C-alpha cells in the first residue's frame, strides 16, 4: 500500500504522517520535504568535524568571560560549492562552550549580521534578562535590518533591544548536562537557526567526571541537522514572501534532503574498537529521527537526557530524537573487528544515511558503564500540585494563519500563566499533530504519556518532550529561582515562528 501525499494530507488534516507498512506504526514525521537543487555528494566522503571549544578571553575567581561575533562566512559544506552561513564566530555549528557547574559564563555577543538576533541558552537555568526573550534583540550595527524579507515589522513593545552587542550571563547553577544555544528572534528563529546560529554548551560537574566514562577523543558531540541547498551551494529556505515566517506550504515544518552532522554532509569517522560517548543533539528545524545501526550488534546505551545523567543506564536498539532533544549515549565498538564499517541510519526515513563509523584498530579501553550513574531519583507525583493545561493546535481563525497554544498565537504582551517559584506544578500538554514541546528555565520529569507510562525515551530530566499526534503528556515541573518572563513553545521551528509560543511569568 502506498498512499499519495495529498491523500495522506486529506486523511490527517494537514499533518504528514509517515508510517512504515507492515511494521508497527512508527512515530509520525511532521513536515514538508524541501529538496536540494545542488548536486549532492556521495555519503561518507567527508570526515566528521568536531566544533572547536570556545576559549575565554579572561577568567576570575567565579566567572569566565567570552566574546562571540555573529557574522556571515562561506564554508565548503558540499564539495566544490560555497555556502554562506550565519554563524557564531562564523561557524556552523558554533563553538562549543565547555563549562563547570556553578561557575558563571559571561558571553558578550556581537551582532555583525545585517538582521536582529536574540540568543537563548536552551536548557539553561538562566535569569530572564539573559534568556533571549524574542524581543530582547541585538540590533545590527551596520546596514539596519532589511534583508531576508524583514520589513522592519518588529513590534518593540515588551522587549529590551540593544544595538551591536549584548552581554548574556549564565550562572550554570545546574547539574552536568548537554545544553545548546541558538537564535530566538521573534518570527525568524527558524531561518536563523537553519543558516547556522546554533552551538553546544556543555556543563560538567564532579559527579559526572568521577564516572569511568569515555573521555577526550572518545567523547564526541553529534549535532544532527537537515538542510537543503540551491544550485550555487546556498541554503534553500522557503521564507514567506509577504512577512515573517515560512511559506504556507511549509507550515508543517521544513524537512530537507541533506543530513549534516557537526556541519558536514553524511560524514565518516574512524574509531577505535572501544567504547565511545556521543552527545546527540537534534538541531533540525522539524525533522525527527529514529537512529539505528545498519548492522549489529551495536546499541545505544543511554546515560543522559536533556537535563543530565539518568539514574541508571538504559539500552536502546533505536533512538527516537525529536527537534531540540539531547541523548547522551555510549556505543561499544569493541564488538567489531578492525576494517568493519557501521552506519547510523534514520529508521523514520527508510533507513536514510546519517553518518558512518569505520573501526580502525584494536585499542585498550578501561571505561565502564556503571549501573548507578547519578544520585537523583524519580520524583513521586506530588499531592496538591498546581495543574495547568497547554493545548498545542493549528489555528487559522481571526486572521491568524499558523499555530496556537491554548487557542492563542504568541503575543509578547500576554503572559498565559503566573507561576510561583518553589511550587510543584503538573503541566499537561495536548496536541493535534506532532509537537516537540519545550519549557524554558526548569527541567521537568515526564509523569504519564497517553494515560500510561512514559516512553523509553522520556526518562531523566527533560526540557523538551516529543508529544505525538493527539496525545496527552503530563510532566512535573518546579521553578526554583529567577523571576521574570519565560517561554513555553513548540520546538518545531516553523511552528514556533508561526506563533506556537506562549509567555509565562515566574513570581
Ligand atoms: Cu531551544 Cu525556546 O528554545
Ligand atoms: Cu529553551
Ligand atoms: Cu509544533
Image (cartoon, rainbow, N blue to C red):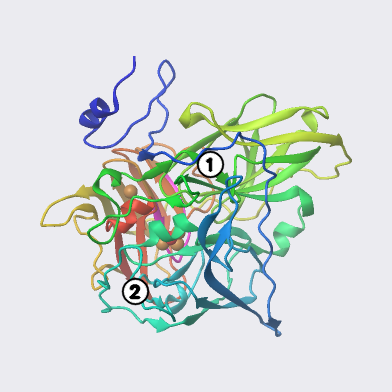
For label 2, the SS is loop
Instruction: Give the residue at mark 1.
Output: 259
Q: Is residue 111 above or below residue 217?
A: below
In this image, 337 relative to 307: left or right? right
Q: Does the residue labelled 1 lie within 8 Å of ligand 1?
A: no
Label placed on residue 135: 2
The answer to whether residue 254 of the structure is visible from this angle is yes
Identify the residue shown where x is 61% and y is 63%.
Answer: 175
At x 31% / y 38%, what residue is drawn? 469
Q: Are marks 2 and 1 in contact (CB under 8 Å)?
A: no
Q: Helix, strand or loop at disc 1?
A: strand
Quarter holding the C terminus? bottom left
Query: Does residue 476 sit above or below 130 in this rendering?
Result: above
- Residue at image location 29% in from the left, 28% down from the top: 5
The CA distance from mark 2 to mark 1 is 31 Å
Region in magenta: 437-447
Q: In this view, does 39 lie to the left or right of 129?
A: right
> Which is more N-terminal, label 1 or label 2?
2
User: Residue at left 32%, top 51%?
Assistant: 428
Question: Which residue lies most toward the left here?
Answer: 398
Q: Position of residue 450 (x, y in %)?
A: 35, 37
Q: Percent position (x, y) of residue 229? A: 46, 46
- Image quarter of the N terminus: top left
Residue 12: percent from the left, percent from the top? Answer: 24, 32
446 is within the stretch colored magenta: yes
The residue lying toward the viewer, choosing from 209 and 392, is 392
Amino acid at each position: 500500500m502506498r498512499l499519495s501525499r495529498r491523500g495522506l494530507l486529506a486523511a490527517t488534516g494537514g499533518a504528514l504522517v509517515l508510517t512504515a507498512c507492515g511494521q508497527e506504526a512508527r512515530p509520525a514525521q511532521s513536515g514538508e520535504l524541501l529538496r536540494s537543487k545542488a548536486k549532492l555528494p556521495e555519503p561518507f566522503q567527508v570526515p566528521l568535524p568536531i566544533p572547536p571549544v570556545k576559549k575565554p578571553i579572561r577568567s576570575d575567581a567565579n566567572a569566565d568571560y567570552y566574546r562571540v561575533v555573529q557574522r556571515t562566512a562561506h564554508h565548503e559544506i558540499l564539495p566544490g560549492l560555497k555556502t554562506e552561513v550565519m554563524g557564531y564566530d562564523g561557524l556552523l555549528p558554533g563553538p562549543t562552550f565547555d563549562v563547570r557547574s556553578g561557575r558563571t559564563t559571561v558571553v558578550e555577543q556581537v551582532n555583525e549580521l545585517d538582521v536582529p538576533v536574540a540568543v537563548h541558552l536552551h536548557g539553561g537555568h538562566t535569569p530572564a534578562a539573559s534568556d533571549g526573550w524574542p524581543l530582547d534583540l541585538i540590533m545590527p550595527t551596520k546596514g539596519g535590518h532589511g534583508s531576508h524579507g524583514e520589513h522592519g515589522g518588529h513590534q518593540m513593545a515588551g522587549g529590551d533591544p540593544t544595538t551591536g552587542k549584548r552581554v548574556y550571563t549564565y550562572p550554570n547553577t545546574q547539574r552536568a548536562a548537554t545544553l545548546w544555544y541558538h537564535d530566538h528572534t521573534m518570527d525568524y528563529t527558524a531561518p536563523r537557526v537553519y543558516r547556522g546560529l546554533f552551538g553546544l554548551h556543555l556543563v560538567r560537574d564532579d559527579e559526572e567526571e568521577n564516572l569511568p566514562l569515555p573521555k577526550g577523543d572518545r567523547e564526541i558531540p553529534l549535532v544532527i541537522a537537515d538542510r537543503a541547498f540551491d544550485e550555487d551551494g546556498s541554503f534553500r529556505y522557503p521564507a514567506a514572501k509577504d512577512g515573517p515566517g515560512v511559506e504556507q506550504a511549509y507550515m508543517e515544518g521544513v524537512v530537507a534532503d541533506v543530513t549534516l552532522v557537526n556541519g558536514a554532509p553524511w560524514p565518516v569517522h574512524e574509531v577505535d574498537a572501544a567504547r565511545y560517548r556521543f552527545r546527540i543533539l537534534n538541531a533540525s528545524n522539524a525533522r525527527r529521527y529514529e537512529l539505528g545501526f545498519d548492522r549489529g550488534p551495536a546499541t545505544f546505551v543511554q546515560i543522559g537526557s536533556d537535563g543530565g545523567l539518568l539514574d541508571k543506564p538504559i539500552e536502546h536498539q533505536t533512538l527516537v530524537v525529536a527537534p531540540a532533544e539531547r541523548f547522551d549515549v555510549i556505543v561499544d565498538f569493541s564488538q567489531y573487528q578492525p576494517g568493519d564499517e557501521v552506519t547510523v541510519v534514520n529508521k523514520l526515513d527508510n533507513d536514510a544515511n546519517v553518518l558512518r563509523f569505520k573501526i580502525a584498530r584494536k585499542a585498550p579501553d578501561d571505561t565502564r558503564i556503571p549501573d548507578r550513574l547519578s544520585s537523583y531519583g524519580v520524583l513521586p507525583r506530588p499531592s496538591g500540585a498546581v495543574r495547568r493545561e497547554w493545548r498545542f493546535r493549528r489555528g487559522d481563525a481571526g486572521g491568524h494563519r499558523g499555530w496556537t497554544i491554548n487557542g492563542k498565537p504568541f503575543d509578547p504582551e500576554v503572559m498565559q500563566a503566573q507561576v510561583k517559584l518553589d511550587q510543584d506544578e503538573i503541566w499537561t500538554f495536548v496536541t493535534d499533530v506532532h509537537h516537540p514541546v519545550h519549557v524554558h528555565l526548569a527541567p521537568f520529569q515526564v509523569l504519564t504519556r497517553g494515560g500510561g507510562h512514559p516512553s523509553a525515551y522520556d526518562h531523566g530530566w527533560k526540557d523538551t518532550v516529543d508529544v505525538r499526534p493527539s496525545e496527552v503528556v503530563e510532566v512535573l515541573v518546579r521553578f526554583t529561582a529567577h523571576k521574570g518572563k519565560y517561554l513555553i513553545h513548540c520546538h518545531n521551528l516553523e511552528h514556533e515562528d508561526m506563533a506556537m509560543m506562549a509567555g509565562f511569568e515566574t513570581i
